[in-house]
Image (cartoon, grey):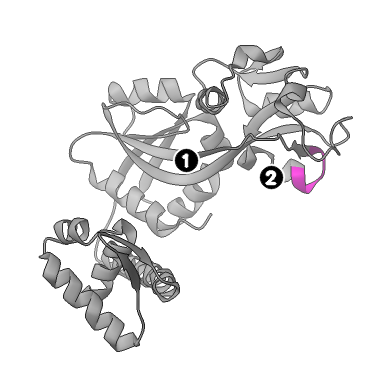
Amino acid sequence: MFDFRLKVFDTVAKRLNFTKAANELNITQPAVSKHIKEIEQQLSTKLFDRNGTKIKLTKSGMVLLKYTEELFATYRALEFDINQLNQKHQGTLRIGASTTIAQYVLPAVLAKFRQQFKDIKVVLTIHNTEVIEELLTHKKIDLGLIEGASKSKSFQYTSFITDEIVLAARADHPLAHQNGLSIEAIKQIPLLMREPGSGTLETIAVALKKLALKLSDFPLEMQLGNTESIKSYLLHSDSMAFVSIFAIVQELKHKTLTIIDVQGLSIPRDFYFIQSHGEQSGVVSLWLQYVKRNNSW
């Protein structure tokens, strides 16, 4: 449907390698070079800087990449909507989601999905990452959404959305207005933690390990089984807790909780769809297409 030359450019821009792009597109490397040259001639600009075998995008290339991504998103949405007009979707979609995703990310997505596909029954099971993986292994759910840092070869992983784990405290905490606390200062503050098996806890442990630290280096105030309990506890305590930024949006808005900056510590993470290897059902495929199309939340 779209200009194949733009697809060639997009692939080269993402891989920054003509050979890899050619293999992925199943065309020859000279053909890739020809398509790129034709676009450069048409736009009267250079798209890549070449240094031996290495290439990088020019400023013009970066601008074109931005627009090709927007164009391809529009094409996907168009194809998706046209396909839905010609099909009737029915069935049950069994999703297993780890706690943070189920509480703070999924509800809005599921509500919109149900508005469009009223004949599909959605069953949502909420557990920590460890349990979700077990449910998928035993085929008790069709796919999972997890927040864990490690990956198993038993599953296929697809990135869903990017999150950040931040250190939170009540807004009037004595340390709330300091510009940035050191790790040593944090090691003196009791922390609330999620339960073993939590993807959030695992992600924090991985981030601390990079700084030669362990969770046991920090005084433990208490372990609680969900983020809502942690947030409520923080409001009545001088303790702090590492939580998903998605979990405290409303509290930040209403200024009941605040983020404590920690020097040298950043904990970004991806949420993932996980599936068993092999062919996926039509309902699962539909859900994944829908989420890919509506990925602006």
Q: Position of residue 123 (x, y in %)?
A: 41, 35
> Residue 295 vs residue 167: left or right?
left
Mark number for residue 126?
none
| Amino acid residing under circle 1 | Asp
What residue is drawn where x is 40% and y is 40%? Answer: 122
Mark number for residue 249?
2
Residue 163 in view in this figure: yes
Measured in 3D between alpha carbons, the distance from the residue under mark 1 to the one under mark 2, in whole angstroms, is: 18 Å
Q: Position of residue 3 (x, y in %)?
A: 24, 77
How many badges with numbers are in the image? 2
- Viewer-nearest of labels 1 and 2? 1
Q: Which residue is mark 1?
A: 270
Which quarter of the rendered picture does the N terminus lie within?
Answer: bottom left
> Residue 219 vs residue 90: left or right?
right
> Residue 255 vs residue 66: left or right?
right
| Amino acid residing under circle 2 | Val
Magenta range is: 252-257
Q: Of marks 1 and 2, which one's residue comes earlier in the chain?
A: 2
Q: In this view of the protein, which residue sits in the foreground, 116 or 32?
A: 32
